[in-house]
Amino acid sequence: MKFKRHQKQSFIIDSANAFTSGRISKRDFLKKMGVAGVGISAYSAGMLGTSRSFFGNVAHAQENTTPEEVANFLREAGKPYAGATIRYTSEATPPTNVLNELKSEFTALTGINVEIEIVPLEQVLAKATQDVQGQLGTYDIYYLDQAWTSTFSPDTIDPLEYYDANPDLAMPNFDFEDFSKPLVEGICEYNGKWIGLPFDIPIFTMLYRADIFEKHGLEVPTDYEAFTKVAEFITEAEKENNIYGTGLQAKSGHYSLECDWTQAVWGHGGSIFGADKNFSGNDAEGVEGLEWYMNLLNSAPASSVTSTWDGQWQMGASGQVAMMQSWAELFPGWNADDSEVKGLWEVAKPLQGPASLRSRDNVGFGEIPNWGHQGGSSIALSRYSKNIEASWLFLQWACSKDIMTRCTLAGGFAPMRNSSYEDPRIIERKELRGAGTTRHLDTVKWTIDNAMASEPDLPIWAGVANNEIPTELGKLLTGQDYDGNAKKCMDQVAKLVDAVVDEAELG
């Protein structure tokens, strides 16, 4: 289906509102977005219709530590805009939640009021699309899922260009070079220009219980074979204590299962698509990865097949499991002062090998096989804002070195800036075993810089990653179909996915 820009925007708005009101299913909504050529990263699509869980440190943001040079700049630059109100709509990402706590500091310095509206992701899309369609300027700052970067590129202001063109509004020491280059390239660049600033990056690492490993004299596994052996050993050795070797996010029909499966396929040398743009999860490497994953069910709680990342969180928080490969943002909350496992969990680099990664020349749709599955977002300045100058001041403040570091300290998520990892406030908490720990961040940074993986980039991907793939995988894992035959399941997935790709004329 071919759309003119205005028609496409109306179609997006109507579809999102229909999903919110329950008139169409999530499956239908994602299919419509695919037809419209609008991507939603599969990670974010997993949160459609709900709110993202916040697995933070359960710590409040630190006291105001705005550098005096920045504070003086904001006081002076903000004077002409005092009394203005700027609006920003977002899903409930960890940095958005913390920023909502801190925004009063910006208002105190500038006199500029800030309204942060937190809604489910499909409503973020609907509101932003409606705003750009009518060039309304209702929202001054947009939250953009990484899959929306190209769609909204005409409607945002390049922050690099705006910074250079408006020296009177340029925050001292803002330092664009300080933003992580892999995040800029993967999240907020389009056709060589910045659409916004990187804001959020959930990513896979290895998580393990140090006390269990020390008790049994175990080495932390670094590859998939060793992980299996350790998981089996712990499950047997700790069965009287009801502790399992690992826990999975393997709920049928949920994107969390697709995340686990994707990482298993990449880790065994496979990919989701081949260079011919056909589904390749049913080749030898893909099947081997799935079989490895299936075997883990023997060393995991039975609830794994009904659990998403929330369930994994509970497994780790309750002390029910000893290790997992999953989102690093699970880790800080296990160090909260009221946690049953406070200080017991540690973090390590994601599993690697023994297979070699499939090269990017041998995959399709921009897929990047690697060891650390990721999902990310940016925030951007609306071209239609009626308060561009005031909004630009807020955007700089929100993504400044100090605020990004403080958001990390309060929420535990990965910083977007390289300097945050070297900030004394981060370093002094590296040995902390409680709320506000930063023990995990060196490993997170290594993974971002060296092993960040990305799922395919095509409009229909969110649909199949949230429907066809995890639905068929769920049938296999729960014994509803396929008689335990991984190859048979993957062949069926290949038929379904290739049909969707062909229908969208993307093959």
Image (cartoon, helix red, strand yellow):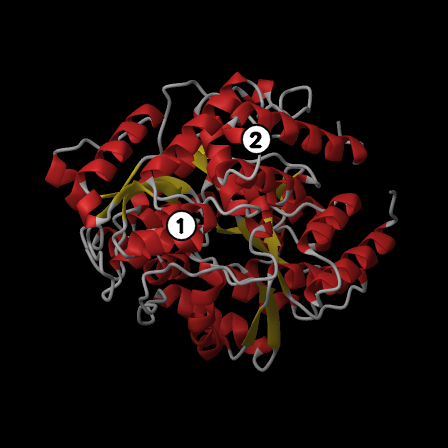
Residue 498's tag is none
Which residue does the numbered mark 2 point to in the structure image? 482
The location of residue 361, given as percent across then percent down, is 59, 18
Instruction: Return the residue nearer the eye: 506 or 175.
Output: 506
Q: Is residue 185 visible?
A: no
Position of 90 compared to 292: left or right?
Answer: right
Which residue does the numbered mark 1 point to in the structure image? 303
Residue 451 position by quadrant: top left
Circle 1 packing at 10 Å, graded few (<14), some (14-19), many (20+), is: some
Residue 338 position by quadrant: bottom left
Relative vertical location of residue 18 with respect to residue 298 in this rendering, above or below: below
Q: Residue furthest bottom?
A: 83
The C terminus sits in image quarter: top right
* Residue ID at (36%, 57%): 408
The location of residue 431, given as percent across then percent down, is 18, 51
Q: Secondary structure at mark 1?
A: helix
* Residue ID at (25%, 58%): 335
